[in-house]
Amino acid sequence: MGCCLRSWWVRIGLGLLIVGAGPLATIIVLANLGLWPDPNPNPIGPGLLFALMFYPAVFCLFVGIVRADKPRAGAWPPGNMLTQSYAQADRASLERLRSAIETQWLAQ
C-alpha cells in the first residue's frame, strides 16, 4: 500500500475523491444526526460536485495503482533474471537425471 501512496496519480485521485465526496458526505451525516437545518435535505450542488469528481478520481486511482504495481525499467533484479535462473537450474537437474538414468541403464 505504501508504494501506491507514493504515486502522484493515487494522491491526486484520493484528493479528488475527498474534495468531491466530502461535502455530500458531511451533509448526509449532519442531517442523520439532526444537526443540519433541514432534516430531509436535497443537496443538489454537493451531489453534482460528487458526480463530476468521482469518475476522474477513480481513473486517477486506477492509473496510479497500475503504474505502481508495474516494475520500473532498470529495477534490480531484472524480471527475466529470476526465470532464467530457474530455467537453467531445471535444465541442469534434467541433465543430471538423464545422465543418471543412462548410467543405470548402461550398467544393466
Image (tube, rainbow, N blue to C red):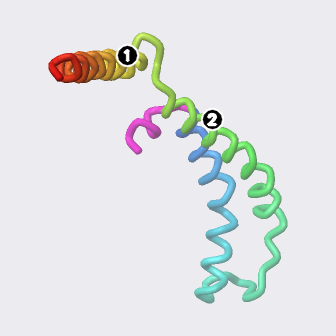
Label 2 sits on what residue type? Val
Is 35 situated left or right of 38 in this image?
Answer: left
Instruction: Give percent across and percent down for residue 63.
Output: 63, 35
Visible residue check, residue 77: no
Instruction: Give percent across and percent down for residue 33.
Output: 58, 87
Specify start and end residues of the magenta stretch as a single range: 1-8
Disc 2: CA contacts within 10 A as few (<14), some (14-19) or many (>=20): some
Q: Residue at x 25, y 18 (%)?
A: 102
Residue annotated with mark 2:
63
Q: Is residue 47 magenta?
A: no
Visible residue check, residue 57: yes
Residue found farthest to the top: 74
Label 1 sits on what residue type? Gln
- State the residue in front, 11 or 73: 73
Task: Check the picture and name the quadrant holding the N terminus.
Answer: top left
Residue annotated with mark 1:
84
